[in-house]
Amino acid sequence: MADLTKASAASIADLADSGVFQALENLTEQVRGLIANRPVALLDWPNYENSGDHLIWLGEKTLLRAHLQCNIVYEASLRNFDFYAFNQLPDDTVIVFQGGGNFGDLYSHHQRHRESIIAGYPERRIILLPQSIHYETAVGIERSRAILQGHPDLHVFARDHESLAIARDRLGLRQAQLGIDCAFFLTAVIHRLLATLPAPDRCLVALLRDDAERLPHGLGTTLAREDWSSVHGVEDSANVQAEAALHSLNLDEVFDTAFDRISWQRLYRAVEILAPGTLILTDRLHGHVLALMMGKPHILLNNRIGKNRNFLNAWTARSGLVRYIDQSQDSAELLMLENYELALQAKERDLQVKESDIQARDETIAALTAERDSARAEQARLRAELLDTERLRAAIAAERDNARAEQARLRAELLDTESLRAAIAAERDNARAEQARLHAELLDAESLRAATAAELDRTRKDKDSAQQLGARLHADLQLAMARALTLDAELVTSRATGIGHEELARLHHALAQAESNAAEGQIARGHVSAILASTSWRITAPLRFVGKIFR
């Protein structure tokens, strides 16, 4: 929550010298004691265009929320007051009425509403925040006296000494107390808001009433003037600006209801009305209060019921920012003020002409300055582009050198590739020659294999023939040996029997023939073995050769 209890040092001095801050502290403690941490119903929100009453409302919210941390359980205006909802409030709820200047019979509808609540709820504590009290008739005073004296727990704050005297002496409210206007609780807020607005650019702003409280002041029609009615129906864009200021000043938590937002918009517009003026002329009490909070020198005129003079005498007469003029006594001074205003207007017109000339010159200077700045910017841009071009040129040169180095490397790789290609071609030719040689050897091997197969077949046949011959020779050998044995036996027998020499010679011849045949058989067996061995070599040697080729 924003700190709404501190104002800037510049405004503190004047308000402190006037006793305003001490009066605010006194009022704070008095209200604190009356509320005593109980819930609050705040009534009589100003549903009309008087910005002064909206300043009071927001000042009261600042008092209750920021200073006293009250729990406000109900808020209402005269028009939307709801008796049913009001009767549902906690029994210990304190009723607090908006302060201001409508206490009495001049604004009868507000007074009757106020008195109806006071009469209808005698069991509740009721507080009337600082009011200016004014009655036009004795009948009105007697009527109010009868109602107000009947409430046992009614606490009234009067805004000036004259009002306090009426409350105590004529209304019989002996417990009534003096209290300063609650709008002064906004001093810190006004200064923070003022810092967001342009500096003053007008000599005089006149904020003058156009209602029942207006007192003829003798001013002519040449004086440009404003009133709070200028605040009513402001444009949506101004309300948007007011909302933006509310958020930027971090006031959302204090001024958080729909009533608060409308009051804030009217406060914002009121500050906008007075901010352009170096000097303020006003017969509005809150024109005076707002000028003090803004730190602006101003002239205060009285109003018809005298509340401006009464308030000034009670609180702000010591301020160095205010000059009070009584219209009934100082009409000449007002006329002088009007003439002064006319002179100021003439000077303002001259100043406007000069300002137009100065503005035109400033615009020319601004245009030339803009052109110079543009030329400098263009020059800087061109320099930057030149630097970028140089950097680009250096980068291109580096890229070119890199490309040349890469080209040389690729050429070397190409030469290596050509050499490798030649070596591969030579290897390929060698491989092809070796393949041809192996193919020829393979053909030779095939031929040899075929010859070997034929030789093997022939050898097998020779082997078979040799085996048959061997078998036959073996049989002949066996037969020859048997024949030799037979002949030998016959020879022995012949010798024993005495065979003749011719027979014996025949037997010897036959035996010799048999032995010869046996020897021939042995020779034939050896020959067969040699044939078999030769055949075996002729078969195995080519096979070894072929195996060596394919190994």
Image: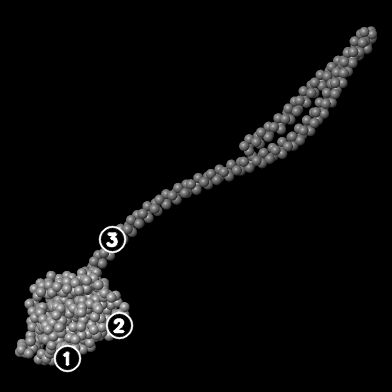
In the image, which disc is placed on residue 390?
3
The quarter of the image holding the C terminus is: top right
- Give x and y (percent) for residue 435: 60, 43
Helix, strand or loop at label 2? It is helix
In which quadrant of the rendered view does residue 104 lie? bottom left
- Give x and y (percent) for residue 407: 40, 53
- Give x and y (percent) for residue 279: 11, 81
- Camera-nearest label, 2 or 3: 2
- Cα distance between the residues tagged 2 and 1: 28 Å
The quarter of the image holding the N terminus is: bottom left
**Amino acid, disc 1:** Val
In the image, which disc is placed on residue 531?
none
Q: Nearer the viewer, residue 370 or 468?
A: 370
**Amino acid, disc 2:** Phe
Number of other residues with Cα within 10 Å of mark 1, as a class: few under 14, some 14 to 19, many 20 or more:
few
Q: Disc 2 designates what residue?
A: 83
In primary-sequence order, the first of circles 3 and 1 is 1
- Camera-nearest label, 3 or 1: 1
In the depicted structure, whether residue 331 falls above or below residue 420: below
The residue at 7%/81% (across/down) is 323
Q: Disc 1 designates what residue?
A: 139
Q: Can residue 281 be seen from the camera position used here? A: no
Q: Nearer the viewer, residue 378 or 188?
A: 188
In which quadrant of the rendered view does residue 483 lie? top right
- The reply to whether dot 3 and dot 1 touch (C-beta < 8 Å) is no
- Cα distance between the residues tagged 2 and 3: 85 Å
- Cα distance between the residues tagged 3 and 1: 99 Å
In the depicted structure, whether residue 192 falls above or below residue 474: below
- Camera-nearest label, 2 or 1: 1
In primary-sequence order, the first of circles 2 and 3 is 2
